[in-house]
Every structure is written in C-alpha cells, then in structure tokens.
Amino acid sequence: MTAPRELVEQRHILLCCGTGGVGKTTTAATLAIEGARRGRNSIVVTIDPAKRLANTLGLEHLSNTAHEIERSRWDPDGDAADGGQLHALMLDTESTFDQLVLTYARTEEQAAGILQNRFYRNIAGALSGTQEYMAMEKLFELHDSGGFDLIVVDTPPTRHALDFLDAPRRLTRLLDNRLFRMLMVPTRGVVRVGGMAAQAFLRTISRVVGSEAVDDVIAFFRAFEGMEDGFRERAGQVTELLASDDTGFVLVTSPRRDAVEEAEYFAARLADGEFAVDALIVNRVHARYCDTDPEALRERARALASRRSDASDRLATQYANLADFEQVAVRERDELTGLEDRIGDASIAHVPELGHDVHDFAALRAVGNHLMGAD
Amino acid sequence: MIVAGKGGVGKTTVTAALATAAARTGMSVLIVEVEGKSGLAACFGEAPLTYEEAELRPRVRARTLTPDDALLEYLDAHGMRRISKRLTRSGALDVVATAVPGMRDILVLGKVKQLEQARAADLIVLDAPAAGHAVSFLLSARGLLDAVKVGPIQKQAAEVVELLSDPTRCQVLLVTLPEETPVNELVDTAYAVEDRAGVALGPIVVNQCVPPLSLDGDIAADAALAGVTVDRSEIDALTAAARFRADLTRRQDEQCVRLAERLPLPQLRLPYFFTADVGATEIELLADELVLGIGALADAGADAR
C-alpha cells in the first residue's frame, strides 16, 4: 500500500484519472505542490483547468512549455524543504501534434505538406482521442528531456474513462486504414482491382460529403506515407513508460453514485490493462458529526415535533438538520464500500467537503494537508 | 428543448423531470439521449434505452440516437445501403467523420430535426452532451455550412441551422449547481450558445439546492425548556451541522445572485435530496417543483405585462 505522501516523495510520474467534475485538476495541482514542498522539482500538466485555478497556476494561456511558479506563492511561510520547484503547463494539443509531425517527417516538404492539410488540422484540432494522445506524448517528452523529479498529469475528462491509454493505438489504427492504403496504390505505379473498387466507393462518399473533403484525405495519406512506423514506435515507448514501476496511478472520485460508478469502471479497465491503482482519492466527503443512526435522529425529531412547544419545535428542526447531513455521510460511505473493496491494496484518502471552491494556494495547501496526513 | 450543462450537474435528472412535468399537462414527450450511458431509464426504474423507442410512462417515450445508427438510417433512406455496410466495416467512417468535423453531430441533429418535422411528439427533450462539447455540438451545423458547399450533408446542415435558430421550435435549457465553478462555466456556455450557436436560451435550472432551514435558538436552553436531555457531544454535533447548513445555504444564495447578475435569465431552483438517490419518486417531486416554478415565471411575466 502506498500512501499519497509516499507517491509524491518517491514516484517519477503520477497520472490522475477519473471522470469530469470530481476535482481531478485540483488533486493533480495539490500533489505537484506537495512534491515541490518536499524538495522535488515538480510539474503539473493540466488539460482544462477551471479559470480561477488556472490563474492561480499562472496558466492564462495555453503554453507548450513549462513555466515556473515563484516559490513565495506556494511556500509563503518558507517552511517547505529546500530545492523544491513547482512548474505548470497547460496542454496545447495542436502544437504538440505539430511538433510530433516535425520530429518524424523525413523532409521539411513532407512536414509542410502534412501541417497544411485540412484533414490533418481536423485530426490535430478536434479528433476525439487526440487530446489524450497528446497528453501522453507531452508526458513522454517531459520525462525524456525535462529534468523533472515529479510529473503529475491531469488526464482529459473523457467519456470513455481510459481513452488516454488507448489513444496512441487508435490513432495508428486510423493511419493504418486499409481503404486508404489501397488508394495509395496507384501512386506506386500499380493498378489493382482493389484500387478501382475503392475509387468507386470514394466517389459515392464524395457525393455525400463533397469531393473537397475526400481530396484532403487522399492528400493527407499520401503525405503521411512512411511516417507511421515512427508514430507506432513512439506509442510503444509511451505504453512502456506508463507500465513502469516509477509511474503511479491515482484514481480521483467524489462520493456521489455516478462518480463512484465511473471510478469502478476505471479501476476495472486499469486492471484489464494490467495497471494497478496506487491511491484512491475521494474528494468532497461529508463529515460525520456523531455515531447515531440517521433514522434514530429523524425519530427523535418527530418525537420532539409532536410535543408542540416552540422550544421542542426548534430542537426538532435541529435534529432534522443533523439527520439530513448524517444521512448524506452514511450514504456516501455506503456508495464507496464497493469501490474501496475493488481497488485491492491501493491507499485510500478522503478529502472533506470544504464548502467552498479550491482555487488558491492556501486552499490547495489545506487539501494537501488532508492528503499527506492520510495513510 | 435541449438540456445541457457540465458533467455531474444532473442534466439527466432534469431531463426526466422536465419530461414528466410536460406529460402531466397532457403533452406527448419524446426523450432523446445522445450520449452513451446516462442512466436516464434508471431514473424511471426502467431498462437501458435503445435506438428503438420505449414508453417509460404514459405519454413519455425515450430512445437513444447515435451517429452511427443515424448514418446507417440516412444512407438507407437515400438508397445507399450497400456502401453503409462497407463504411462501418472498413473503418472508413472514422476517416470520413474526421475529414468532415461535426458530421457525427449533424447526423444526430439531422435525425432530431426529422423527428420534429414528423411531429413525433409535442415536445422532444434532448439530453445533450456535457457542456464544452454541447457548444461544439450546436455549432456543428454552422461549421458544416461553411465547409461543405454542396450535397445532401449541406442540405441537412442548413435545415438543422434553421431549426436551431428558431426560438419557437428550439430552446436550450442550461443546468448548473449553486457553486462557484459550475456557475462560471454556465455563464460562458450560455453566451456561447446564444451568440455563437444562435440558439435561444430558456430558463436556467439551478439543480441540487439544499433547502434552507431556520436553525436558531440555543440548543441547550431549548432542551431545558422542552424538558429533554441532550448530552454535550450531541449538542456539539447539532451545532456543527447547523453551522454547516447555514454556511452552505448562504453560499448557494450568493451564487444564485451572482448568476442572476451575470446572466439576466429566470432561474428555476430544484432541491437537493438528502434521503435517497434520485429515482422515480424524486423525479415526480422535481416535476412538481418545475411545474410550480414555471407557473411562477409565467405569472411574473403576465404581471410585468
């Protein structure tokens, strides 16, 4: 079992996964800050931070390079360990992809041909899965050449949980598309029946979506020829990095039913890919105020209300209120039982409902204290 | 009516409650779910939805609508059944959809438009994709009009734009929570929907508002007056819970006020349920609230006139 504290002290990469709206970015920022406070050179890679949190991290604009956050901001009391640094980066999917094309193109002409192609721009800008892919690509780049001790990645809030693990594979599948490989046949000077059938097929598609789009696609696949191997090799390296012992998976959730169900699905998918969850972080858990069963509290409220005096009415309302929040707290713990059983020997940390948004360093520090204190 | 909002704000619950409220007035309602699993049928205690319509309760029907299904249907209807199989089997559909961004969305919206024109129901409620995606979903038709100049897809896009920009035929109901970040994101989405996508906005639904309770009086003194014993630790628990609720409801009100300042649209507030997850009973209660809220808005509108 590895507590969050040990993860930020020892691991090289932490991937925060989970569905949207559960405080994943906040958790990622907190872990990076706690790493920096322990003397490590750390960076948080975010995808789509809420505006105020982004401002705190100095991320007003997309930037493909890490920028350092002044120590006085994340360590105002000067009590953190020496040597720590904190960086932040907001992923720019398109320019990361462009960089990748520039790396693998054999000639400048090839790169230019691809970068200008409209079909390529659509892939780089909007294709679902590209963001996940580029997050992993950026992670690899930071690992390879960034000189960071700790890289915390906030994974994209995808509908299908673990797309980021599949993303490199999905893109290579698109590039491998048989139909378009057949289309490229004539350029090699061989005309085959398959090529003719494909041409006919394409003409039909053109009738539906217009021929410009189809021309773009053909131009793209021609320009891309020969680069697939480089891409595939890189995808393999990324997968290897994710599987390394130096990489930790942090599953983030809230105690609400839909989020917990998503988290269970995540945990199962991670296990399919033979990755283990190292820590489960549950944000916004309601405190329990007492050990009394909520139903007993409601009963007490009803008994008091039946006494018909102002004082007992007021007291009844107090009991009803306590019963409300106890009931929420009990339900949350019930929701979490199945998930907590399922994640094997991962550590579990609960962050209490703080009652306000977390978007400045003081609040992030408060979350950090809860996480670092957890076993 | 398109119900949209950031993930986790309860879009699906609001969709179900809205459909229920409309059905009570005698309207026939069709709920269309465009994103995989949203648990809509579970709200009514029914099995998951399929591409075939299912009746969830009297006058409320529901179905899913996926781009792939919509495309196959479209190609079928246009005499291109043979290529449809090949498109999906060869994986070329992925390539084509990438070449023409927004094509998947336009297929779904195109089908919705067809349902609307065929008068499939008095009210069609669309459970839209999560916020950021909802805007691009609504923008897809305009984007396609710019990119594709001819052909059936272009015609489809033009008709969808016409539907979306007619406030008598289509409105977006945005859902949020009474919390800072969801409110901020809702404001951004609202302006994008209205200004960029050109779709009219209905009232804002503020979901999961914890109802205020008047928690005053000194607990120990009231216990003495009422002649009951409350031990020290229980007084502490009651006090802490009372403070938590007071803080929470105050912050909620602040967020609703802030939302009203930044977005001059009527708000419908729906309550949070402490006792259970949202199921069929809660949907009925939420529908009650919507009927009351919409009635109040209508009265206010009449007074203003």
Image (cartoon, coloured by chain):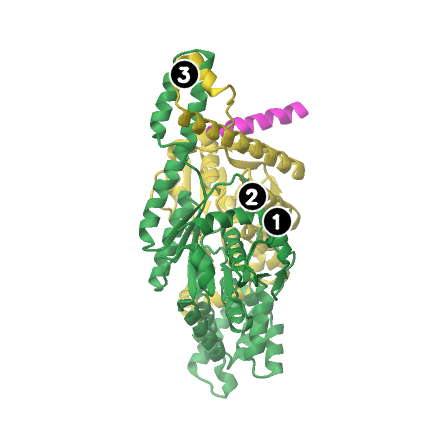
Side of B291 relative to A64 (left or right): left
> Disc 2 marks which amino acid?
Asp
Which chain does the residue under circle 1 lie in? A
**Are the residues flagged by discs 2 and 3 from a single subunit?**
yes
Residue shown at the point (45%, 76%) measured from the top left: A232
Q: What stretch is highlighted in magenta?
A: B287-305
Chain designation of label 2:
A
Looking at the image, residue B255 sits to the left or right of residue A371; the answer is: right
Q: Is residue A114 visible?
A: yes
- The percent position of residue A211, horizontal first and vertical second, equals 57, 70
Q: Residue at label 1? A: A52
Is A365 magenta? The answer is no
Q: Name the residue under label 2.
A: A357
Q: Answer yes or no: do the residues labelled 2 and 3 have beta carbons within 8 Å?
A: no
Q: Is mark 1 on a helix, strand or loop?
A: helix
Task: Give how far apart the Cα atoms at labels 1 and 3 are.
Answer: 45 Å
- Residue position for label 3: A305
Q: The yellow chain is which one?
A: B
